[in-house]
Image (tube, grey):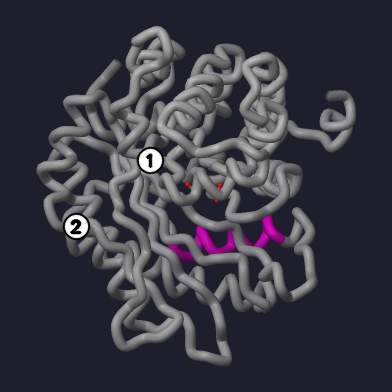
Amino acid sequence: MSERLEDIAAAMVANGKGLLAADESSGTIKKRFDVIGVESTADSRRDYREMMFRASDAMTKYISGVILYDETIHQKAADGTPLVDIIKASGALPGIKVDAGAKPLAGFPGDTITEGLDGLRERLADYYKLGARFAKWRAVIDIDVAKGVPSATSIGSNAHALARYAALCQEAGIVPIVEPEVLMDGAHDIDTCYEISKATLTKLYTELYAARVVLEGTILKPNMVLAGKKSGKVSSPDEVAEKTIKLFRETVPAAIGGIAFLSGGQTDEQATANLNAINAIGPHPWKLTFSYGRALQAAPQKAWSGKPANVAAAQAAFAHRAHMNHLAALGQWQPTLEQAA
Ligand code: 13P
């Protein structure tokens, strides 16, 4: 396959395919395993991810790429095959999370800044050799309006870091996924999410331009525009679609390689229904697909529960969610397809 950045980016969002975000840090995957009663060890993490990557129905038809964590990109399957080779054999691209996490922003209580730029040039060169053709960096923007969160300083510092990361990725022949996640955890309404997301994306594209990042060789991984979880309101798919597309038309250049949403704590079916509603009101200037972690993995995790006897059922649960999100990426999903499963 072509090594040009714009071709890699186009492949990541092609034909109703989307990304599997399997890049949970060891701390996060432990939390997920605690829920299903599985001890988190290097082997159990390997067994779980091998189960997903060997789900050939899901991987070959619906998944364009997999975002890996540092441990996983170095791991081998139980039979000695590198996990990266299993992903490549399915036709999907291996990718890698390269940020070092969101840390408190000094002087701005409640805000965070994502770290990980030091030594990034060298790490990217190593990841390229291991097969990674795209990377991910997640900035985290929380909303607590009464406390002045987020500050303009937080939005600006995170956008600047994303731009420095993106430029280094492109230098290394790697497509950067730029992820400025406005969290849905707060008590805010949908219009507040829209306003904060607008400030965040406006700053992001100003910084990417200043850093001479080639937009065609980037993928945006945004949140949808939604009411916060603690508001007690669930925004309807029609409202989410209308406000999310309005936001993007105002802030996101048509030139970028594509858009792949995070799920961010939506239920599995909300994440699918909202993506579908967004695509159903197209055509749009960009491809809009999924890059889901929780909304693709919650069902297979539960079905697997750490037992080898459950591997086939877990792979079927993954294939179902991947199929539903594939249809949503094409604007062809229907709620009745969920009941038929
Ligand atoms: P969720 O879909 O669970 O939000 O995870 C996607 C992701 O990669 C967040 O960085």
Circle 2 SS class: loop
**For residue 339, which quarter of the picture?**
top right
For the N terminus, which image quadrant?
Answer: top left
Magenta-colored stretch includes residue 252? no
Res. 216 in view:
no
Of 160 and 87, the residue lying toward us: 87
Residue at 33% from the left image edge and 35% from the top image edge = 71
Circle 1 SS class: loop
Residue at 74% from the left image edge and 61% from the top image edge = 239
In the displayed structure image, the side of residue 39 where residue 280 appears, left or right: right
Residue type, mark 2 in image: Leu
According to the image, label 1 marks what residue? 257
According to the image, label 2 marks what residue? 117
In the displayed structure image, the side of residue 158 where residue 261 appears, left or right: right
Residue at 50% from the left image edge and 44% from the top image edge = 29
Asked if marks 2 and 1 touch (Cβ < 8 Å), the reply is no
- Eyeballing the image, is 126 above or below 214? above
In the displayed structure image, the side of residue 135 where residue 235 appears, left or right: right
Q: Which mark is residue 185?
A: none
Residue type, mark 1 in image: Gly
For the C terminus, which image quadrant?
Answer: top right
Between marks 2 and 1 in the image, the one whose residue lies nearer the viewer:
2
Residue at 38% from the left image edge and 62% from the top image edge = 139
Res. 41 in view:
yes
Magenta range is 240-251
